[in-house]
Image (tube, grey):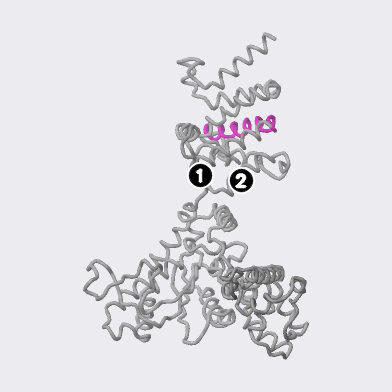
Amino acid sequence: MASTYDTEEQRIIDRIKCIAFREARDAGATFINRQWVSEKVHRSVRFVTDWWGKSYDQCVADYSRAGPKLKLSPASQDIIRKASGQQRKSCSVVAKEIAQKQREYVTRRTINNYRHREGLKPFHVIPKPLKSETHISNRLWLCDWLKDWTEEDFLHLAPSDEFYVWVVRRPNYQNDRIWAKSVDDIEEDERYREMVKDQVCIGIFVIFTAKRLHWVIKEKGESWTGQYFRDVILTENVIPFLKDEENVIDPNEVIFVHDKAPCMRAYPTLHLLQDNDVKFWGNDIWPGNSPDLNMAEHIGTIIKDEVEKRMLSETEHSGYLEETLKMHISDVLTHMEEDTELFETLLCSYPSRLRAIPLHTAIRRTAIDLIGRGYTTWESYLDIGQVLLTLFDLCSISDSSTMTSNLHGGILTPRTDTCLTARTALYLIATSRSRVVIMTLAREIAKYALVQSGTTSSPTSITLKNEHKLETLRLIQILIEKCSQDIEDLILEVIDITLNCIDLNILRHKGVQAVSETFGLLLNKRIQDSLS
């Protein structure tokens, strides 16, 4: 039959085919009949019957507007067009909207036909991946924002989450199901429960601090709407809980952390928290979709595990009742209410969790490369000392043997790729601003020497590490080859940098050949300059 998205051009072609097949039949092709033509042109027998007796001139007439008059008014048509490109705008929903706004009662079929007439096509919305580049960059920004926080700072957080607990814990994947004729066919080491149709569940909201756990069990029939969160969860529970000195370390320092659910990130919810002087991580701070960073997610897992153990111990009938589930949930929450050791352990694990977030991502390598290539553009906005220190750190994350093996046909890991990108950016900055780089390195090495000698106890703006010295010597070597005039003008600073980056004991006992190649190049340059 005809395609759902038929066009007038295709109909004209099929009309001509019908007439041509009829002429072939009249010429002697007796095997041709209406059914045969219908299968060839993918049209109904009625379509073939209507057209194969007509002339070719009639085929090109426009019949797209033929048929019954359109029932939709111009205003209703505008409503349908405005609903295009939006989710949750099905034909039934749009029909109800037209009835409410225009007092016109049309069927969803009428709207469906109009959409096809206008050339609209249905598409499935593919959800964006959880770990998109934007999401990764937001998580990296949060890690950088919290890099100076200590464990004591994290103890002031109050993470929260809402979730459902089911009578029979739902499997996460199809592979978690076990297909068997009877219970006897299941291995004894498997933990199993019979799957229940239309099982009940109970919604829970939890929030905890370093001192106490607080929870709200959702009443039957309530929904997790924004109004419910503001009136019941926040106003009646969360805000009084955070203001009580018995629940938090310091009411003035506690920070409310939500999971960025739609009802929590709504502006009325944020304004309610602000009006009640509650500190919180807003939508521009918390990345969302980060269960590994929300400690309340871990609390939820513990609660579900404990409730499941208790439900398994029930008899067959009572193990599926809502009253039994609610009783066990209350018992588990009451038992955990003052488990300060667990709460402190979870909150103090934030630094390690932040460090576990992958640092060697494509977006970070792109940023490093951008800094190197465009340093002269935004030089005035950057601290050259901090930029050099960071690039030195990234250059030292991979040893020379690993770098060599990767460069000669090995697999380029993200870690090594970051190292190579940082090294390239460092060399680009050094060659474009060689004088600034030399003076900055000389100044920071002088600060480092003062701290090492104990002459000063004030912290320096940059901490030079031993693992930076090899990369510093490579950098000086490139400057000797490509920026010889700047090296000559700042020869004292260059010598000072070089001497601080080589092992003087080796130089003293084994000579110049045993130390870095940079020092040899520097000496050769001085000899050539003196001869010239």
Above or below, 473 against 342 in this view is: above
Residue 465 in the image: x percent, y percent?
Answer: 52, 36
The picture quadrant where one finds residue 236 is bottom right
Query: Which is nearer the eye, 245 or 177?
Result: 177
Per the image, the residue denoted by label 1 is 414
Q: Are marks 2 and 1 in contact (CB under 8 Å)?
A: no
Residue 342: tell me if it is visible.
yes
Q: What residue type is labelled 2?
A: Thr
- Decide: is 220 above or below 363: below
Which amino acid does the dot numbered 1 rest on? Pro
Q: Magenta residues, as a range?
A: 432-453
Looking at the picture, tell me which residue is in the foreground, 364 or 489. 364
Regarding mark 2 in the picture, which secondary structure is present there?
A: helix
Which residue, as the protein is rendered here, is positioned at the far top? Answer: 531
Cα gap from disc 2 to disc 1, whole angstroms:
12 Å
Query: Which quadrant is the C terminus positioned in?
Result: top right
Asked if residue 411 is positioned above or below residue 167 in the image, the reply reads above
Residue 366 circle label: 2
Location of residue 430 in the rendering, given as x and y in whole percent from the top left corner: 65, 32
Query: Neighbour class for label 1 at 10 Å: few (<14), some, many (≥20)?
Result: some
